[in-house]
Amino acid sequence: MIPVITIDGPSGTGKGTLAALVAERLGWHTLDSGALYRVLGLAAARRGLSCDDPISMAALAATLPVSFAADQVILDGEDVSEAIRTEEAGMAASRVAVHPPVRAALLGWQRRLARPPGLVADGRDMGTVVFPEAPLKIFLDASPDARAERRYKQLKGKGLDANLPNLVADIRERDARDRTRSVAPLIAAADAVLVDSTAMSIVEVLDRVLEEVRRVF
Ligand code: C5P
């Protein structure tokens, strides 16, 4: 079986950065599953479709002209790697992600990305739904305030506009939707290793996870 490491948790915990670092250390592939939902949200907005309509969203998920090349996400032939990182795209993604037929349409797609020598997959349901047999599952958490502050610094660092109270409110809204939806809600798998990064640097988190990698593989 192809080895898979899953990293799940709420937005802004640094899952993506951690997944990239772990994959680099091991020479494995990565799956940024949030990018799939973000690109769907962006495509819906560009086509004038409502993210809240399960039928058109499932049809869009099944036929989306998207490809992932190196670090780029290509939609309709255009590089949307930056466009999918906005707060609006994140919010649209979480609205699209509540529909069971959308999630079903993306399931096989995600599973096919598990290929030798191994995969590090990050998202909300990697350990619970997409790769339930993964030998190592990490659930990365942090307080909403710590997550909003990190996002604030990131946006400011890029010279973009940011408002801390709005970011805290957005994070709480997105968390609530991700945790309470009926299908694949954000919860830690029963066998996941819980890591709370509120007071940890990314290097400390990486060390903690590499300890688990050495234990399991
Ligand atoms: O991780 P990221 O912030 O990019 O994800 C954007 C949104 O996509 C999340 O808020 C969540 O609603 C949805 N998502 C999901 N399942 C995943 C990954 C992301 O529902 N595996």
Image (spheres, rainbow, N blue to C red):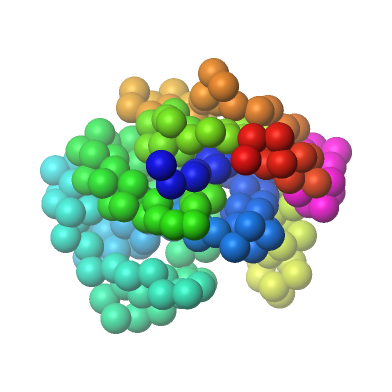
Q: Residue at x 27, y 59 (%)?
A: 44
Q: From where the camera sits, is residue 167 visible? A: no
Q: Splitting the image into 4 quarters, where does residue 36 fall?
A: bottom left
Q: Residue at x 80, y 46 (%)?
A: 207
Instruction: State the quadrant of the C terminus.
Output: top right
Q: Is residue 168 placed above or below 133 in the rendered structure? A: below
Q: Nearer the viewer, residue 118 or 166?
A: 118
Q: Is residue 100 placed above or below 166 in the rendered structure? A: above
> Is 32 included in the stretch rendered in magenta?
no
> Is 200 included in the stretch rendered in magenta?
yes
Exactly how many numbered labels are in the figure? 0
x, y percentage for residue 7?
57, 41
x, y percentage for residue 56?
15, 49
Q: Nearer the viewer, residue 210 or 151?
A: 210
Residue span colored magenta: 197-206
Q: Nearer the viewer, residue 79 or 131?
A: 131
Q: Residue at x 29, y 68 (%)?
A: 66
x, y percentage for residue 73?
41, 71
x, y percentage for residue 30?
51, 57
Q: From where the camera sits, is residue 33 visible? A: yes
Q: Nearer the viewer, residue 127 or 104?
A: 127
Q: Residue at x 54, y 18 (%)?
A: 190
